[in-house]
Image: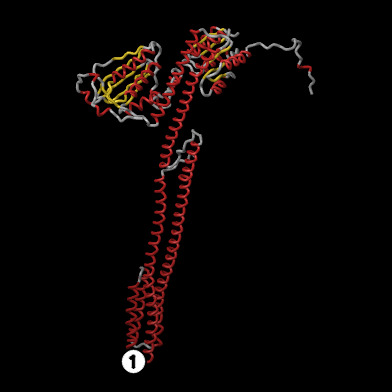
Amino acid sequence: MSRQWPSLRAMAWRGLLVVALAVVLVFGASLAAITELRRATANTLSEMRTLDLTSRIETDALRHYRASNLLVATGVEAYEGVQDEIADGLRSDLRSLVELAQTPAEREAAESAERLMLVYLEQRVALEERGVLLEELVPQVQPRLDDALEAVRGVRTLVVARADAAQARAEWFSRAVLVSGVAAMLLILAAALGGAWVLDRAIVRPVDRMSRAIDGFRGGRYGARLDTGLPEELARVSQDVNGLLSYIAWQRENQLAFLGGVVHDFRNSLSIMQVGMESLTRPKDPPSPEKARRTAEIVERQVRRLNRMVGDLVDATRVEAGQLQLERTRLDLRSVVEESIELFEESTAAHRICFLKPEVELPVLADAGRMAQVVNNLVGNAVKYSPEGGTIQVSLYAQDGNAVLAVSDQGVGMSPEESQDIFQPFHRGRTGAGVAPGTGLGLSVVRRIVTAHGGRVEVESTVGIGSTFRVVLPLIEEAELPSPEGAGSRPPASEDQPPAQG
Amino acid sequence: MADLLIVDDNIELGDMLFDILLSEGHEVRIARNGLEGVTEIRQRKPELILLDVEMPQLDGPGLAYQLFLHDAGEEAIPIILLSGIVSLDTVARRVGTPYFLTKPYSLKELFSMMELALLERRPPVPTSPPGPLPDAGTSPSP
């Protein structure tokens, strides 16, 4: 799958953003609706008061009209106060109507109603004072009254229209709240579904695939690797695991190659032994005693070689298993190197070994047998990989409180990539595999021994020119002082006598 | 008795084989690696090559390939691969020879395989006296 995923963190933030958006939407819509509702409630109160006022004004106007007419018609004194009282109430009600007006149009309508009503009242009072008869008075004042009432009705119409508008707005808001609620729900649902989908595609399935790939690897598909087209966090894990898998596959290949190499070398020796023995016992062509002796020597050499390889294998296995036990005593590296070189000089006439023996003692705290193994291995390798007649340079010197042993050959050399791997157990150099026999375990054992002594091994090599191996071991501190006794001096008994071992 | 070429970098094994095959009455030459082998073959073509696989300079399959390149596979010299490597059968298939022996082998095995390989070089001998070839054109056709 080549889909490019953003990181899990980014996706989580996106989901959170969607949910937050939904919440803000619902909250905002509700707040707006509540505000509108409160305003509408307040308006409803003023509308009711206005309506109440208009109906009272209408009633009072009619009552005043009737009472005045009655007074004019009958002239009964008792009616006089009633008519003025109604007129006063009417005036104050009209004033209230103007004050209650909410919009400029309402205010204008209310003011015109007040004005028309006052015009009617004044005209009426003026006519009554002149003592006009009812028959003449009515036709003159009634149109004025009708105008005033019409204006009052106009105010009522406006207020009712406003109430209608408020009602419509309230409807709109309630619908808006509903719609935004549904939208928010859909958003949250989408976020949840998207989250579930992402969880499935970006996490659950990839993790499934990962564990399947790892199972496959365990089952023998060593080319199996995890996808890296995943969210960043998982991709990182994938890459790490892939690195590990590659390392395991590489190690396995090395071990197989190593096994093949060991088998090849064993078979070579066995083959020489087989052919040699058969050549001795052939009835057809019995060998001369001289030739038989030579063949026996060859076979014996192969037996020794096989035995050495088996020893190497056992050694490497034990060292790799961490069962390296050191019996450390005070050693002069010069004598270790000297002994080793003597051994090689006896057996290899074809190579010249050149040792620059230093003047001063180089004391280290080390296991004598293991140190000899290290030196033998390095010198042996140098002999093995050098052409006949080549010179092997062995030098020994002190540097920064360490003893340094350097072994240089004029052999086939190695590329930088190869020199990185040679200290790995079960690794055989490609250049050398066909050239020299051996298990290829020697250098890994050398490194283990040297590191167990607190030192390190380095290699410097050029293809076609040769290699230099350097062993660096810490010197014993007291060696800084001149030691008159030289190589024969013995260390204090306390530090070099480990308990006897079985 | 045949003209043989041993190509093996193992001096001891090569020398022993050389002595034994010589005493069997063969004409034997020995080369220490693939390059020497190619030189020997250029000088005179052997009837059979006993070839090791892993060798410095030029390995066994490399020698076989050089051989093929130089005469374009026209004159096939039988090759017996002799090696201790793990997947010798695969290498033999790649080299294109049916003859291979995994080390260690017995001389008896080696001799019988040599006999088998040398059969390739012998011209066929007809069992009945040679007569006119049956004419392919006279057979009735449907």
Q: Residue at x 47, y 42 (%)?
A: A206
Quadrant location, the C terminus of chain A: top left
Dot 1: element:
helix
Give the total number of marks visible in the rendering: 1
Residue at the image point whose x is 62% and y is 15% from the top? B116
Colour approach in the figure: secondary structure
Q: What residue does disc 1 label?
A: A78
In the image, residue A165 sits, relative to residue A188, either above or below, namely below
Along the line of sight, the residue nearer the viewer: A153 or A317: A317
Residue at mark 1: chain: A
User: How many neighbours does mark 1 have within 10 angstroms: few (below 14), some (14-19), or many (20 or more)?
Assistant: few
- Residue A441 image point, x, y percent: 41, 24
- Residue A182, above or below A97: above
Asked if A103 appears above or below B45 in the picture, the reply is: below
The residue that appears at 27% across and 27% down in the rendered structure is: A496
Q: Position of residue A136 (x, y in %)?
A: 40, 86
Q: What's under tag 1, amino acid-wise?
A: Ala
Left or right placement of residue B38 versus residue A396 in this view: right
Residue A234 placement (x, y as % from top left): 42, 42
Residue at point 46% right, 43% down?
Answer: A207
Q: Which of A326 and A134 is in front in this view?
A: A326
Depth check: give the residue in front, B74 or A323: A323
- The image shows residue A407, relative to residue A203, as above or below, that is above
* Residue A418 horizontal/vertical position (percent): 40, 23
